[in-house]
Amino acid sequence: MKNNLSFFYSLIKISVLIFAFLFATNILHAQPPDPVDIDAPVDGGLSFLIASGIGYAIKKVKERFIE
């Protein structure tokens, strides 16, 4: 019973954190919105994440075929 109760409490904590992060993005803004440009720019950080994800996938595929 104690394990089920601790699992329930951890599930509630995780749910509260997820909702807090989701709703905080609507409240907090780094800069005011630009009335002309509505699209979000793709900057170097996102490009780096995509490139590192592709590199990691290639590494895993190579490891799988070597074994």
Image: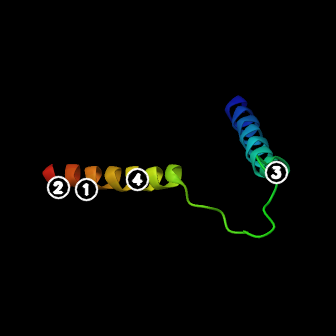
Mark closer to the chain start, 2 or 3: 3
Mark closer to the chain start, 1 or 3: 3
Q: Residues within 10 Å of mark 2 (few under 14, many from 20)?
A: few
The residue drawn where x is 80% and y is 59% is 33
**Label 1, label 2: how many angstroms apart (C-alpha)?**
6 Å
Q: Is residue 43 left or right of residue 55?
A: right
Q: Which residue is mark 3?
A: 23
Q: Residue furthest top?
A: 2
> Residue 62 location in percent, x, y?
20, 53
Three-letter amino acid code of the residue under disc 3: Phe
Q: Nearer the viewer, residue 14 or 54?
A: 54
Q: Which residue is mark 1?
A: 61
Mark closer to the chain start, 4 or 3: 3
Secondary-structure class at tag 1: helix
Quarter of the picture holding the N terminus: top right
Q: Residues within 10 Å of mark 3 (few under 14, many from 20)?
A: few
Q: Quadrant of residue 16?
A: top right
Q: Mark number for residue 65?
A: 2
> Residue 43 location in percent, x, y?
54, 55
Secondary-structure class at tag 2: helix
The residue drawn where x is 25% and y is 56% is 61
**Label 2, label 4: how many angstroms apart (C-alpha)?**
19 Å
Three-letter amino acid code of the residue under disc 4: Gly
Q: Are marks 4 and 3 in contact (CB under 8 Å)?
A: no
Looking at the rendered image, the disc whose residue lies closer to the viewer, 4 or 1, is 4
Q: Residues within 10 Å of mark 4 (few under 14, many from 20)?
A: few
Looking at the rendered image, the disc whose residue lies closer to the viewer, 2 or 4, is 4
The residue drawn where x is 34% and y is 49% is 56
Q: Mark number for residue 53?
A: 4
**Label 4, label 1: how many angstroms apart (C-alpha)?**
12 Å
